[in-house]
Image (cartoon, rainbow, N blue to C red):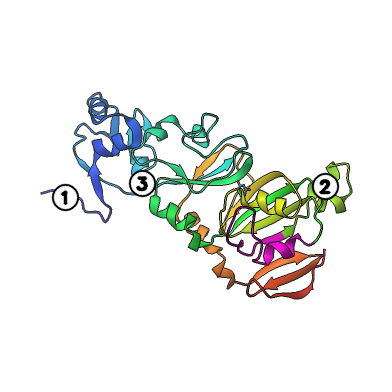
Amino acid sequence: MNKPKMSLHPSIRADRLISNLGYGTRKDVHALALSGQIHLDGMPLKDVTRKIFLENDLPERLTIAGKKMDPLPGLVLIMNKPTGMTCSHKDTGALVYDLLPSRWRARKLKIVTVGRLDKHTSGLLLLTDNGVLTHRITAPRSKIAKRYRVVLEHPLRGDEGEIFASGRLVLTGDKTPLLPAVLEIANDKSANTFNVTKQIMSRLVAFVTIYEGRNHQVRRMFAAVGNHVVSLHRDRVGGLHLQNDMPLGTYRLLDNNCTSSIFDDTFSSHNKCTYYLSNSKAFRVFSPDTPMPIGSESG
Ligand code: URA
C-alpha cells in the first residue's frame, strides 16, 4: 500500500495555488489541466483539486504550458530601479511594476515595493508579497541602514557630515530631529573624465547612510545645508548590496540568506556609535549630542 507523502511544508489545492499566481480563474486552470498543459514531476497533472506541498523546489517541478511555474507566494525581489519610474500602483506614468512579468500583477497576494524610492532616484529597491517582511524592514523602530550615492550641485562645504551626524537636524515641516546619519566623501574614480579637478569632483560626490525613511529625506537633508541633489542612487539596504552586474531595470529573486542580510546593518548594530567625516577628520557619536574626534582621516 502506498503511504501518503508527508512534508513539513503546508499544502494547497493545485488549482487554487495556480490561480492565485495569476494564471487565470480556477476554471481556466482546470481547462489547462484537461488539455494536458500542467505537469508535476514530468507527469501530466489532470486532477488539479489535488493538494500539493509548497516545497521550495515546486516551481522547478511544476510546469505550465511547458514553462516552470512562477515563484511561490512569499517572494522577495531586488531591483535596480531606473529613474523616471514611480513606486506607486496608482500613478499614471511609468511604474516599477511595469518591469515585472504582466502575470505577476494578477497574483492574489500583491507584490509591492518595500518602502519607496522617488521617481528620480535609482538603485536598490525591494519588492515582496510578504506583508510581515515589509513591516519588519520599514517599521521606524527597525532603523535599517540605507546608503545613497549622491551627486551634488555645489561642492561640500565641509560641515555637512557633522550636521548630519548630530541628531539635531530638523527638516522643514518635520517636528522631530533626524537620527544621526553618516556622510562619506566618495573617492570617485571617474573624476578625471570630467573637466574638473579630482579635488572638486570628490566634493561633489558623497555617500550618505540614513537609518529612517522620511519623505525625500536625502534631498531635503542636502537642501537644509544649502545644496541641491543632482542625482541619487541607493546602493545598499542593511547588509544587502546592489551588485554591479545588475543592469538598471532588472530584478532578481532573493534567497533567504540574502533576505536576512538586510537586518545585518541597523542603527542599533552600531551600538548607537556613528562615524562621520568633517573637514577630513573622522568623528564618532556615542549619543547624538556628543561628537568626539577620533583622529584624522587619511586619503
Ligand atoms: N531620499 C530621497 O530624497 N529620495 C529617495 O528616493 C530616497 C531617499
| Residue at image point 59% right, 71% down | 272
Q: Let me know if residue 6 is in the magenta part.
A: no
Q: Which residue is mark 2?
A: 191
Residue 174 within the segment the image draws in magenta: yes
Q: Where does residue 246 sit, x and y in percent of width and height?
A: 60, 42
Mark 1 element type: loop
Residue located at (62% from left, 52% from top): 217
Main structural element of the magenta stretch: helix, strand or loop? loop
Q: Is residue 2 above or below residue 35?
A: below
- Extent of the magenta region: 159-183
**Type of amino acid at the residue the image marks with label 2:** Ala
Instruction: Kindly identify the amino acid type of the residue bearing the numbered disc 3.
Output: Asp
Question: Which residue is under mark 1?
Answer: 4
Q: Position of residue 88 (x, y in %)?
A: 50, 38
Q: Which numbered mark, 2 or 3, is in the foreground of this view? A: 2
Secondary structure under the numbered disc 3 in the rendered image: loop
What residue is shown with label 3?
57
Q: Secondary structure at mark 2?
A: helix
Category of crowding for the residue at label 1, using alpha-carbon neighbours closer than 10 angstroms: few (below 14), some (14–19), many (at least 20): few
